[in-house]
Each structure stands twice: as structure tokens, then as C-alpha cells.
């Protein structure tokens, strides 16, 4: 049973309440009762072991037992711009990117893209972020932005940022080679549609954007995103335990 629940308002004071779908799940599905203990999080980076004090029809009153700041985020941040696949593949992609620690997911508008999510679809994906965060233990929610073009992604990127473009071809460098020389700066990585980026889109990226190859096989959108995020997640290091990137790892 999942004992983590998301509170959409900052947790302050010694008491708080769960309402809406989170409360209904706790009351009706999990059959909670006063005295049961759960963990709350509110997208602040903190989590709050709490005890249920009282339950209403669609409201749970809780006593905050502890306040723990637990950081499970990637450092440096990974911003992933992806030309979303169709249908249920979108939700699967979102769930896996949350689990792997992606900081921000940007639906990428491309010349050859086949799925341009409307606001209602984006809201569903943002709800999937909450569910995946409850499961994997993240205390901050992965952001899903409004759809952007490559130019808009570059313009909105952090001031100091590494730009990567997943694109097969003779000018692309293997991902492990790129990682060996990467810097401890935020990463904006872009994954195109299954038809690939157009020549115009590649030209838009400019020389500062490094083209990377994910291997000799043609990958589906979500596979490419998963492969890229997995490698970055595995080699990222916390300040307290070592360098940001494994310069001398077997894959370098």
C-alpha cells in the first residue's frame, strides 16, 4: 500500500488536511482509520510523517509528526524536450521520466511530430506526475511545460546550460563520449519525433548544441528518452559523495 500522499498546499503548522482525490483514495480505497500513519509531501522538497487524527466524507485531518528535507533530485538538473508519442505511450513516458529524476519535461513541437497535446491532455499528464512521485519517493514534482519549439526551448533554458540533441548521423558523437567531457551544469536534451528532426530544426540549434547518438539502432521516442535519462541519472553524483560525472567510468 502506498503511504505517500501529495498535499497541493504548503504544509505549515502542526496540522494539515488532505482533500479531493487524495483524501478519497485514503478513505475509500485504503480504508484508513484514525491512528494510521502516512507520509505527506508538498512539492517543497520536504516530506512529513503524519498521523491521521480524524476522517470525514472527503477530508482527512492529520497531525504532523516530523519535518524531513530529503532531496532525491538530479544534480545538475536535466531538462528533457521530447516530441511526444501517441496515446498511452505519453503517460508511460511521463512516469519513467519522473522515476529517473528528470527536472522538467517539455513537449516539443517539431516539423514531423504527430502528437501535439492540448491543455486537457497536459493536465492528465501532470496528474500522472503526482502518482509517479508518490511511488518513487520524489518530494518535488517534475514540471511539464506548455509545448515549445526548439527555438523557444533554447530561449527559455537556464543561463548556463549544456545543449544536447539526440540525432543519428555521421556528425553525432556517442553519448558516453559526450558524458566524459560534460560539465556540472544544467542539461537541456532534445529528442525528436520518429521521423527525426528536419534539417531546418538542426540548423536552428546552432553550433553550441552538441549532437549525440544513442546507438546504431533506430529507437522509438520513449525508448530514446528513457535511454538518455537513465544514463544521466546513473552517472550523476551528489556533491557529498563525489564528482558530478564519472570521468573514468567503464563507459567513458
Image (spheres, rainbow, N blue to C red):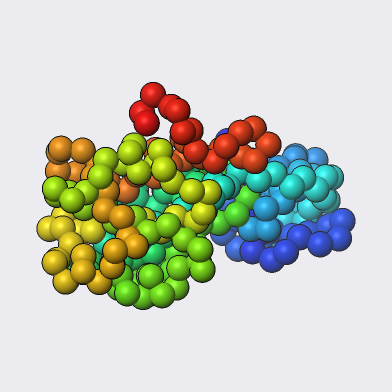
Q: Position of residue 92 (x, y in %)?
A: 34, 48
Which residue: 74% across, 47% down?
A: 69
Q: Is residue 59 above or below residue 119?
A: above
Q: Position of residue 57 (x, y in %)?
A: 67, 60
Q: Is residue 164 above or below residue 122?
A: above
Instruction: Pick the quarter of the image with the N terminus.
Output: top right
How many numbered circles does the render carry? 0
Which residue: 68% across, 58% down?
A: 44
Q: Is residue 239 above or below residue 169?
A: above
Q: Position of residue 76 (x, y in %)?
A: 54, 50
Instruction: Pick the quarter of the image with the C terminus.
Output: top left
For residue 139, side relative to residue 188 (left or right): right
Task: State the residue in front, 190 or 84.
Answer: 190
Instruction: In the displayed orientation, state which residue is furthest to the right.
Output: 14
Which residue: 54% across, 41% down?
A: 244
Q: Position of residue 209 (x, y in %)?
A: 32, 60
Amino acid at each position: 500500500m502506498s503511504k505517500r500522499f501529495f498535499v497541493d498546499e504548503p504544509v505549515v503548522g502542526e496540522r494539515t488536511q488532505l482533500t479531493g482525490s487524495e483524501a478519497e483514495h485514503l478513505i475509500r480505497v485504503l480504508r484508513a482509520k484514525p491512528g494510521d500513519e502516512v507520509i505527506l509531501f508538498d512539492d517543497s522538497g520536504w516530506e512529513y510523517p503524519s498521523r491521521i487524527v480524524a476522517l470525514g466524507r472527503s477530508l482527512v485531518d492529520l497531525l504532523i509528526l516530523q519535518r524531513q528535507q530529503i532531496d532525491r533530485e538530479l544534480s545538475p538538473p536535466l531538462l528533457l524536450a521530447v516530441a511526444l508519442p501517441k496515446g498511452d505511450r505519453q503517460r508511460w513516458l511521463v512516469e519513467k521520466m519522473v522515476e529517473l529524476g528528470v527536472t522538467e519535461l517539455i513537449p516539443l513541437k517539431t516539423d514531423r511530430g504527430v502528437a501535439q497535446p492540448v491543455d486537457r491532455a497536459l493536465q492528465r499528464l501532470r496528474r500522472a506526475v503526482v502518482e509517479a512521485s508518490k511511488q518513487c519517493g520524489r518530494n518535488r514534482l517534475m514540471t511539464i511545460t506548455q509545448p515549445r519549439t526548439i527555438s523557444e526551448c533554447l530561449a527559455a533554458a537556464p543561463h548556463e546550460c549544456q545543449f544536447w540533441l539526440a540525432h543519428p548521423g555521421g556528425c553525432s558523437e556517442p553519448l558516453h563520449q559526450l558524458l566524459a567531457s560534460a560539465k556540472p551544469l544544467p542539461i537541456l536534451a532534445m529528442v525528436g519525433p520518429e521521423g527525426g528532426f528536419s534539417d531546418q530544426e538542426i540548423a536552428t540549434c546552432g553550433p553550441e548544441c552538441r549532437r549525440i547518438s544513442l546507438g546504431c539502432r533506430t529507437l522509438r521516442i520513449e525508448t530514446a528518452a528513457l535511454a538518455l535519462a537513465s544514463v544521466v541519472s546513473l552517472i550523476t553524483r551528489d556533491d557529498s559523495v563525489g564528482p558530478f560525472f564519472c570521468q573514468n567510468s567503464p563507459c567513458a
